[in-house]
Image (spheres, rainbow, N blue to C red):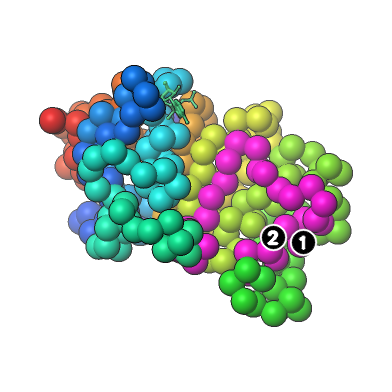
Amino acid sequence: MNNSPSRTPGPTGPRRAPILAAHALSKSYGATEALRGASVELTAGEILALTGASGSGKSTLLHCMAGIVEPDAGAVTYEGRRLDGLPEHARTLLRRTDFGVVFQFGQLIPELTARDNVALPLLLAGVRRQAAEQRADACLERFGVRGQAASRPGELSGGQAQRVAMARALVTEPKVIFADEPTGALDSLASEQVLTALVHTAREAGTAVLVVTHDAQVAAYADREVQLRDGALVPEPAAATATARVAGDEH
Ligand SMILES: Nc1ncnc2c1ncn2[C@@H]1O[C@H](COP(=O)(O)OP(=O)(O)OP(=O)(O)O)[C@@H](O)[C@H]1O
């Protein structure tokens, strides 16, 4: 099942220090315990698939690790620094500089062209317009949608729109990409094209990717897969833990 060529060039050898780690995260929404002591680590350049049944807490874990949602308990550490507990403006800044986010529906700005959507994070970071547009075009090219640069999102197919969203997430050269069901709304061909583009670009740039998915095809593109059940990580089989250590939900 994991014979995707993308599996092979992933990080090998001794496991490195994590770039991003969640430790014993808990999060409730009223009486619903979305996370119950979930722990997971992501190393630089690693593509990690987070799987599990609907409602198992995948999106909540991704949102906590991206600094979008604050956990009730536990810690999120990015490059050795605590992310949870930082003021909102500091987390927003970090998301702009170091993180890229892609959701199931790309959430492109409908009034802007594909080029302007992709250039926007650069403009927000203070890059001058001409340079931002050049970098946006280069990124669109990498995702195979340079020809759609002048189109607005409503004029794009689902797969094209999602590739533009990926280009927007990667244009700032983030260290970590968070992708929540990035191909959930696509057919299998479009899904494969989007994933291939994401994996190749992430590999080239050494970007770590945390991808939430229901889909075995998506998980097959990852270096490693971890599963959530009822808000906690399912421990990996002993053979897998030798090369991929995930602190589970022992508590
Ligand atoms: N903002 C919220 N308010 C109330 N309950 C929420 C909220 N977000 C998530 N939940 C609940 O927390 C639990 C975990 O949800 P979450 O979206 O993290 O799971 P998931 O595994 O990503 O699910 P799916 O695969 O269906 O997207 C669910 O019971 C959900 O209804």
Question: Mark 2: is the Cβ under 8 angstroms from ligand 1?
Answer: no
For residue 169, side relative to residue 247 (left or right): right
Q: Which residue occupies the extreme left position in the image?
A: 251
User: Where ligand 1 lies, by quadrant?
Assistant: top left
> Camera-side residue: 3 or 238?
238
User: Dot 1: within a 10 Å radius of its alpha carbon, few (fewer than 14), some, or many (20 or more) residues?
Assistant: many
What residue range appears in magenta? 94-122
State the SS at label 1: helix
Instruction: Tell me which corner region of the image, top left, top right, bottom left or bottom right, holds residue 237.
Output: top left
Q: Position of residue 212 (x, y in %)?
A: 46, 36
For residue 129, side relative to residue 9 (left or right): right
Name the residue located 19 percent from the left edge and 31 percent from the top edge: 249
Q: Quadrant of the C terminus?
A: top left
Which residue carries the number 2 mark? 118
Name the residue located 48 percent from the left edge and 59 percent from the top edge: 92
| Position above or below: 63 against 10 | above
User: Dot 2: within a 10 Å radius of its alpha carbon, few (fewer than 14), some, or many (20 or more) residues?
Assistant: many
Q: Position of residue 153 (x, y in %)?
A: 80, 46
For residue 97, side relative to residue 182 (left or right): left
Q: Amino acid at mark 1?
A: Arg
Name the residue located 22 percent from the left edge and 54 percent from the top edge: 15
Numbered badge on residue 203 = none
Answer whether labels 2 and 1 touch (C-beta < 8 Å). Answer: yes
> Camera-side residue: 68 or 105?
68
| Position above or below: 140 against 70 | below
Q: Is residue 10 visible?
A: no
Which residue carries the number 1 mark? 115
Name the residue located 43 percent from the left edge and 56 percent from the top edge: 88
